[in-house]
Each structure stands twice: as C-alpha cells, then as structure tokens.
Image (cartoon, rainbow, N blue to C red):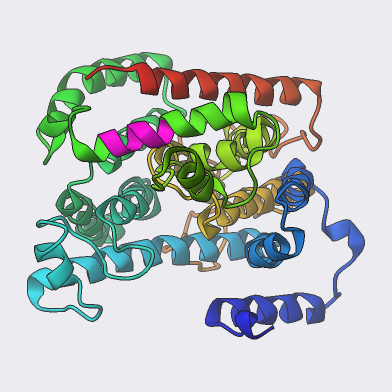
C-alpha cells in the first residue's frame, strides 16, 4: 500500500472519490458503453492473466487503467472535453518552453549538463520521462499541428497572432532534439492532419508537394544525413526489432513472454538486455499477437470514430481534428519509441471514447448562437454556428456503437499489416 502513496496514485484516488461522489453518482451502465470500454477491459484482463505475476501486474497497471475510467467518466460534456484538450496541449507547450529554458539561463532540473555531456548537444529535459532526446522530441512534436488547429485554424486575427508565436516553441524544441524519428513522425502527422477533409484535388496537390519539397526539407534537418544502419543507435534498434519479431512470430506467438519480461528474456537468450525501442515491439513480445491485435485494435477504434464522426459546428470539428492528431502522432511514434504502458496511450483512448459517448448521446453543443466561453472557443460570437462553407451533415454524430465482424476483420488486417511492416523494417537496407 505504501507504494501507492505517490503523487500520481494519490491523484488517481482523489479522482475515483470525486467520480463516485459527483451529483447523480455512478451506475454500472456508465462503464461499458463504447467499443473502447469493452476492448480496454479485455486487454487489461488479458495482460494480467498471461503475465505470470498476476497480482504484481494488476497493481502496476491498475493506476493507468483507472486513469482511463476517470477520464471517460469525467468528460461528460463538450465543454469539459474542450477544457481537457486545451490543458493537454498547454502542458506540451509548457514542456517545450521549459526544455528550451537552458538557452536563456532557466534550468530547474539540471538539463544543461546532460545536453552538453552525454547527449552531445541534443536537447533533453532532465526528468525520468524526458531525459532522452527522442522521448522529448516525440512527446512535443504533435504540439505543432495541435497549436495550429487550436489557435490558428478558423480563428480571428487577434488569436492567430499569439498562436503563431506559441507554435514556434514546440517547433524549436523538436529541432534542437535532433531526433530523426520525431522529424519523420511530425512530418507524417502534419501532412495527414492538413489533408483531412480537404477536396481530393487539393489532397493530390498537397501530396505531390509533400513528396517533392517536403522530403527535401526534411532531409535538411539535423542528423537526417546520418540515416544509416551503420549508425550505433539504429543498430541497437535492429537487434531489438529482430529479437522482438522472433518472440512475436515464433517463440511466444500468441501470449508472449509476459508483462515487462522483454529485457530479461533477451538477457537469458542472447546475453544482452536492451530496450525494445518500440511500443509494438514491447507489446508483441510480451503479450503475443493476441495482445498486439488488441493494442492496435484500440488505435483502430479511435480512428474509426474520428474518421466517421460528423461534427456540426466549428467547435466540434476542432475537437475532432485535435483528437485525430493525438491518435496519429501516438500511433506513428510508437514504431520507434516504447510508450507501451505510458499513460499517454490510456489518455488518448479515453479521450476518444469520451468523444464517442458524446456523439452517441447527441449532447454536443446545440446549433445556434452561443455566448458561452471556453478555452477552445476563445471568442464568444459565432462559435456554434454551422461549419463555414460546409453543408450541415446528415445524421450528425455517429451511429456505430458495437464491435462487429467487419471491425474484427479490420483489426486482424491491421495486425497482419503491422507484422509485415515490422519485417520489412528489419530487412530494409539504407
């Protein structure tokens, strides 16, 4: 019990108490209402049962699973969802500003010595989570499109101007991490978010521009010329990916080697123990193809909700785009950073599940003039009018609420595609 008396666990307990004591309380029917809820519960149970250390695994994973429940139960209105997303983006921007502080003499966590020493000039924020340039870069890079859609897209000029300045903070932070994976993940996320809901002609033109000038610009970024399998960092990933692929497809194909047993298994088999370097590598190795299918399935469910949702107002549309960026960025970055059990995954799934609930309940803000003010609104007038230059969608919201046979086939297909891409990454020569 003493291990639970930490700030993050105390916040979890406080959230659980607040959830139970809220007006109207909570009922059993509140827990399992969307496909996310069911699949999250099944995956959590599967990980615990197949871990080999059920009590230990249950106690370790329970806080992040509870985070999922609390977020889903708390974001019961469009306004709450907007405030949550605003705070989330604000924290990422604040992180980038604090990391950049070493260049102006602000260094509360002693990052400068690490940057100038072991990191050889690559920017880090010297905490347990962000003390690696790749971790910092991948954590901050989604803020670039997020700030754009939060403060610039369809905003009045007086909001766009400070938004442009704030956008520079995460951009400059990622640039100084010199993280090649962050550059690629950021470019892919930015491109997809900008193509979303565009006319197909404009999409084709933007894709052609991206494949030409975009690739040329990315190659000019720091360390991109060092993209070779001869590099020590990539060689480490090669070893990790090969070992993980062997576990996932041959040695422990269905249920894996158990929760957090990747490194110890590697030590036993080949005498070295290195990080998995990928969320998918970690999940596939420790929970087999069944666990990986469910993990990818949660990302699939999120994409299905966000791609097929029909928002009616600018505010709803902005929420949809912000969530899409979070899911895309996490899914892409997970190929090269191990965020398998990070709270970010559970936060992302929970927020999309909460959005799905709002769409199903049809309690999103009603169409019409509104004088309410919220962080994503920023201007009280015309914020709830129908999306500019777009026809109001027929049957707004979303009607899908259960995992069907087609969804299962898509999840299995995503697993096969993921394993294929994983194998090709191992075989690739560059």
Q: In the rendered image, which quarter is residue 97 located in? A: bottom left
Residue 80 x %, y %: 60, 65
Q: Is residue 311 above or below residue 251?
A: below
Residue 406 x %, y %: 75, 20
Residue at point 9% right, 74% down?
104
**In this view of the protein, can residue 168 be seen by the observer?**
yes
Q: Which part of the image, by quadrant, shows the N terminus?
A: bottom right
Magenta residues, dominant SS class = helix
Left or right position of 58 against 200 = right
Residue 353 x %, y %: 67, 49
Q: Nearer the viewer, residue 194 or 262?
A: 262
Left or right position of 15 against 101 = right
Residue at point 51% right, 56% down?
344
Q: In the rendered image, which quarter is residue 157 located in? A: bottom left
Residue 412 x %, y %: 67, 22
**In this view of the protein, can residue 279 be seen by the observer?**
no
Q: Nearer the viewer, residue 42 or 55?
A: 55
Q: Is residue 198 above or below residue 427?
A: below
Q: Which part of the image, by quadrant, shows the C terminus?
A: top left
Q: Is residue 322 above or below residue 10?
A: above
Q: Which residues are magenta?
A: 235-241
């Amino acid at each position: 019990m003493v291990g639970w008396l930490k700030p993050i666990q105390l916040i979890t307990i406080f959230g659980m108490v607040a959830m139970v004591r809220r007006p109207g309380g909570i009922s059993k029917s509140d827990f399992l209402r969307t496909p996310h809820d069911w699949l999250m519960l099944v995956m959590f149970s599967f990980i615990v049962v197949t871990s080999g250390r059920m009590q230990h695994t249950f106690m370790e994973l329970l806080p992040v699973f509870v985070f999922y429940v609390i977020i889903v139960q708390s974001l019961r209105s469009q306004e709450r969802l907007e405030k949550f997303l605003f705070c989330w983006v604000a924290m990422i921007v604040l992180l980038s500003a604090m990391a950049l502080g070493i260049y102006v003499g602000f260094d509360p966590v002693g990052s400068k010595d690490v940057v100038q020493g072991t990191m050889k000039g690559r920017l880090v924020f010297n905490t347990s989570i962000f003390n690696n340039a790749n971790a910092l870069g991948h954590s901050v890079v989604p803020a670039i499109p997020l700030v754009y859609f939060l403060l610039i897209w369809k905003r009045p000029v007086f909001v766009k101007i400070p938004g442009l300045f704030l956008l520079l903070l995460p951009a400059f932070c990622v640039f100084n991490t010199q993280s090649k994976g962050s550059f690629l993940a950021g470019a892919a996320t930015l491109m997809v978010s900008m193509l979303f809901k565009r006319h197909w002609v404009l999409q084709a033109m933007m894709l052609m521009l991206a494949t030409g000038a975009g690739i040329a610009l990315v190659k000019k970024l720091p360390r991109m010329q060092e993209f070779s399998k001869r590099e020590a960092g990539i060689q480490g990933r090669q070893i990790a990916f090969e070992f993980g692929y062997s576990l996932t497809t041959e040695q422990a194909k269905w249920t894996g080697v158990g929760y957090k047993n990747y490194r110890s298994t590697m030590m036993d088999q080949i005498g070295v123990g290195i990080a998995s370097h990928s969320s998918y590598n970690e999940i596939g190795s420790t929970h087999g193809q069944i666990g990986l299918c469910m993990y990818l399935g949660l990302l699939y469910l999120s994409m299905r909700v966000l791609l097929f949702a029909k928002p009616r107002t600018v505010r709803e549309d902005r929420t949809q785009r912000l969530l899409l960026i979070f899911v895309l960025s996490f899914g892409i970055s997970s190929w090269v950073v191990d965020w398998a059990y990070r709270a970010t995954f559970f936060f992302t799934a929970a927020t999309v599940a909460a959005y799905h609930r709002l769409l199903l309940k049809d309690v999103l803000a009603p169409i019409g003039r509104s004088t309410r003010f919220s962080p994503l609104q920023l201007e009280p007038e015309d914020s709830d009018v129908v999306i500019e230059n777009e026809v109001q969608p027929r049957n707004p919201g979303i009607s899908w609420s259960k995992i069907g046979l087609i969804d299962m086939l898509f999840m299995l297909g995503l697993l096969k595609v993921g394993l294929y891409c994983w194998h090709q990454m191992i075989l690739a020569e560059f």
